[in-house]
Image: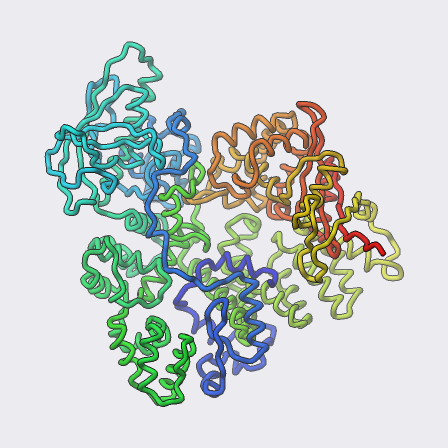
Amino acid sequence: MMTGRDSLNRLIGKRRRYLPNRESLLSAPTQSSLNLCNDTKNGKIIPDDETEKGNSKAARLVTCPICGSDVPGDNHMINSHLDACLARGTKRKLTQRTLLQLNFSAQTKDQNHSNETKLSTTNVFSEGPVESLEQNSICGLANYVAVEDYNSNHWRSTENTTSHQRINCDEKTPLSSPHISGPEHDVNVTVDGMSEATLQTFIVGRRYGDEKEIKIGAHISLSRDPNNVKDPNAIKVFSADSGCCKVLGYLPKELSEYLSPLMEKYSLSFEGFVISAPKHSLDVVQIKITYHKIESDNENDDDIEVSTCLWKRALHVARSAKGYPSSMIKYQCNFNLLIHEVLGNSRHLFKADEIDFLESFSMLSEDSQRLFVRLYMRKGPWFRLSNISYPEVSNSREAVRELTDNGYICSSEDTNELHDAIKDICNLLTVSELREISRVLPKNCHRGSRKQKVIASLLCFYEDGICPFLPKMILDRTGLCIRVSSKAEHLIWRAERLFFLNGEQDLSAFLLVDLGIVKYPTYNCIIAEQIFSGLCDLLAYEEAIELAQIMDQSLDENNIELVLRCIMIAESRMSSSSCKAVQSITSELANTFHSCFSASWVYSKVVLLGISFLEREQRFNDAINLLRRLLSCFTCDSRRGYWTLRLSIDLEHMGCPSESLSVAEGGLLDSWVRAGSRVALQRRVLRLGKPPRRWKIPSFSESIKRKITEIHVQGRPLNCEIGMKSWFYGEDGEKCGVEQLALQYYAGEGGGWHGVHTESGIWLTIFGLLMWDILFSDVPDVFRSRFQNAPLDLATDSFYIVRKNLIESQLQKIYDGMAEEILITSWESHVGTVCRGVNWDRHSLSELRAAVTCIGGPCLAHLCRHLAQDYGSWSSGMPDLLIWRFHDEYRGEAKLVEVKGPRDRLSEQQRAWLLLLMDCGFKVEVCKVSAQPVST
């Protein structure tokens, strides 16, 4: 795969079905100094449909077996497309099943009851206006609470979105809890001061109940269900009127989290009654419950304080849950929350009509909201109304009518929509329906069993005017078809991007949390400044992402002309005055995460991918011009090392060794050239800088030429194919790779070592566990939603600079030998919680403890310091094996081994790591595996 393709795919995320700026992007004249496209007219590219008209009849389309798309039938195009598909790992989706169809589980498997109920002093329930807490305790909601002092416990409301804004994410409220105004419970009540109090909530999980019919006024009682496999805090709701105590359902898990310790540890009993009857047997049931305190002589002040705090949190959860109707389904509630938060936090990034459009969603009927969310999360883009059936949507046709009237969906009744989407609607037909249509057409119409071939044949007749009634024939069989409108799709995409600030997460992130599959860490979101200062910046960023998607799609389709056009557009816009202004403004923050949200940064990624494409096509001169453009536009960027290295290599390809040497020497003077790129440039200088070009030996010569210990291991090979992974017979006779063979050698005749094949994995896991509290410490602007697994500035220089005192204090503890204690505490407190780099399943606590003990404090502290200072450069390329052995119960030694097969060699990043580890005091070596000589 070309360099930069993966990174660009992560930036784009899920491909958009509609790109509003596509036509303007491709048709606008460019100011690029390059002329990569030969078939352009006055700077404008020829539209795809015009170029296809002349050869549409002659083109022979075949269906790709990997992704299912149509590809021109000549051998070169087929092979290129297959290579691209296989490299991307794309495959045909075999099912339309989504996360929405899964049953919700209550909590993560590893949630520990005692840990969750353990309370520490926090400002959540400090004295002050409770209304402010209620409105702002949910992460990301509108009207953030501003604080005058960074550590102040005094909360107040504010309308100034640019002042310091703080969200308390320690609060264990539901992710979908709404913004509520006005108290409905006495939250100042104390358990010690009153003998009883009431709380209004509802019964969920009705499908697990024994009693389906519930009447208003029915008496209920609560009982703990500690053996519940989905939720150890579960609380059952029983019917108190029936003698057999039938189960009606459960309390919401967010409420049970605080009521369960009150029932178990603080002797509270609950009873209540039903206040509203459900319309359907499985609907949630609204109830009012009252607690009665059982007096005890053993209570102390601490118990009273903790129980009061738990009750206040329970009241807060109950109040928050009343913001949406009890009938609102989880995914519907999540969608409303996302829209609500984005409009509250980033209202200045939407026009007035866009705000009205998004706000109108909450005014739609329940059925309309649910149907729209369902359709938005499906692949689409078109759907047959006759095939739409969801149990929670009672009247699909009425919902479609309301959504159409409000502009959220479009239907096939619109003739313009139908003409532009005839191919997509054809895909809704079954093969038998397509054959039925083809029988009416001339005999030369394709009537085979391959759906895409039949569709291509039908479209060919339609475009040639032979079958003008094709749309009517299709709709006669599909019935009414609908799709999400372009306006709705664009605005919801923008809302998702502003909420998650990346392309890899979407609404399914809510569902993963609700299902208990993912648990995010606890941290405080402190907002000091906006990511996008105004709508112009956001629109430029969106337009750049659109160009990145066009570039990615063009590479998939092997549309070389459009790829070159995208490169030229990106280069011109990256170098334009507007983007230079952005770059100059962000130069002080050039290595902070803010620069990653500028249009110029996105264009630079498109250009970098274009450079890789041009190098593959051996157009080195164009690649050299683009690399020089990148280096001139981005003077403070950690990617400069790779750019400089590629420039030096391409110049050598062009037969300019002296200029290549000068570029390499200049790169070594650049403070942004680091890690593997610096080592690679140093090695190039030593190789190219021999007499008579250079007579003086560089000062780094001795360091870079240091010998790395090599160990040679022989094995019986299973294959000897060039370009394929090498496989060998292990000591047990089973098939294994070179890394497993090396581990077997070190465990046996190599010296009785234990170890793991992990590369960077175990080191990033150790770093994450040792630095957990620092990763999620209170730093402004680096946390902006509850769905982050790391601070936004982790891979930038600012991570270490901002937290220098905290990091150095932790590193001193590690140096002094406290690493194992910190590791155990962090593991037990956060096991199962997502954190970037931490892999809970791959490494056990015993392995990590053994590794940390044998490595020793000084070496581990040096390694963690390098990762903290430059995580982006050093988070990859670590040696393959970490091996250790104990000398006694508390002492041991460790070694890092890079394993190379018969035809492998060290990369520059790997060599840089080995040299760095040697400087840190580690024992390192290279293990070269080769085939045993054949005896004659």
- Is residue 665 among the parts visible in the rendering? yes
**Horizontal side, residue 290 vs residue 451: left or right:** left
Residue shown at 37% from the left, 47% from the top = 510
Residue 772 position in % (x across, y down): 52, 35
Residue 781 position in % (x across, y down): 46, 43
Q: Is residue 14 above or below residue 430?
A: above
Residue 475 position in % (x across, y down): 27, 76
- Tally of numbered discs: 0
Residue shown at 60% from the left, 73% from the top = 33
In the rendered image, which quarter contains the C terminus?
Answer: bottom right
What sort of colour scheme is used for the picture? rainbow
Residue shown at 52% from the left, 39% from the top = 840
- Is residue 669 among the parts visible in the rendering? no
Residue shown at 89% from the left, 61% from the top = 692
Residue at the far front in the pictured view: 936
In the rendered image, which quarter contains the N terminus?
Answer: bottom right
The foreground one among 902 and 69 is 902
Q: Is residue 662 above or below residue 64?
A: above
**Horizontal side, residue 768 vs residue 898: left or right:** left
Q: Is residue 931 above or below residue 73?
A: above
Quarter-wise, where is residue 373 in the image? bottom left
The foreground one among 843 and 326 is 843
Residue 738 position in % (x across, y down): 69, 49
**Horizontal side, residue 756 vs residue 238: left or right:** right
